[in-house]
């Protein structure tokens, strides 16, 4: 995992200051090398939403940090999460 300052939570967040105002990056991002649940059906909606938030933050970071774009694993995880969330509410992903 990257150091705390490698992933700013928000561009206006200070990189220094009280530790109480800072968040560890593993709460914000989910890198392709980190564990991901095999069975999303076993998770609660809240757990799915947290994972989705982490994946979206990771995608944002990858788009900004890598000219080649996001990692394929991150994209696959996003698709799986969208499918799992849509299945809970009975909608379909219009993008496939």
Image (cartoon, rainbow, N blue to C red):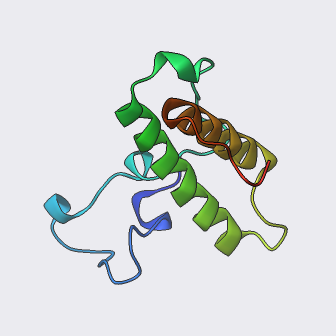
Q: Is residue 36 above or below residue 68?
A: above
Q: In terms of depth relative to the viewer, which is nearer, 34 or 76?
A: 76
Q: Which picture quadrant has residue 32?
A: top right
Q: Is residue 27 above or below residue 7?
A: above
- How far from the left and from the top, in percent, is residue 74? 69, 47
What residue appears at the point 33 percent right and 75 percent down from the top-left corner? 15
Please state if 7 lies on the left or on the right of 16 as rendered: right
Q: In this view, does 18 lie above or below 92?
A: below
- How far from the left and from the top, in percent, is residue 11? 41, 81
- How far from the left and from the top, in percent, is residue 29? 50, 51
What residue appears at the point 49 percent right and 36 percent down from the top-left corner? 89
Q: In terms of depth relative to the viewer, which is nearer, 50 or 44?
A: 44
Q: In terms of depth relative to the viewer, which is nearer, 10 or 91?
A: 91
Farthest residue, direction front: 90
Q: Which picture quadrant has residue 65?
A: bottom right
Q: In terms of depth relative to the viewer, which is nearer, 96 or 50?
A: 96
What residue appears at the point 52 percent right and 59 percent down from the top-left corner? 57
Q: Which picture quadrant has residue 34?
A: top right
């Amino acid at each position: 995992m990257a150091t705390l300052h490698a992933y700013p939570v928000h561009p206006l967040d200070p990189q220094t200051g009280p530790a109480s105002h800072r968040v560890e990056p593993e709460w914000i991002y989910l890198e392709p090398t980190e564990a991901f649940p095999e069975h999303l059906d076993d998770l609660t909606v809240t757990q799915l939403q947290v994972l989705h938030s982490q994946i979206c933050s990771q995608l944002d970071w990858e788009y900004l940090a890598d000219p080649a774009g996001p990692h394929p694993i991150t994209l696959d995880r996003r698709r799986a999460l969208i499918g799992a969330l849509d299945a809970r509410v009975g909608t379909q992903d219009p993008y496939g």
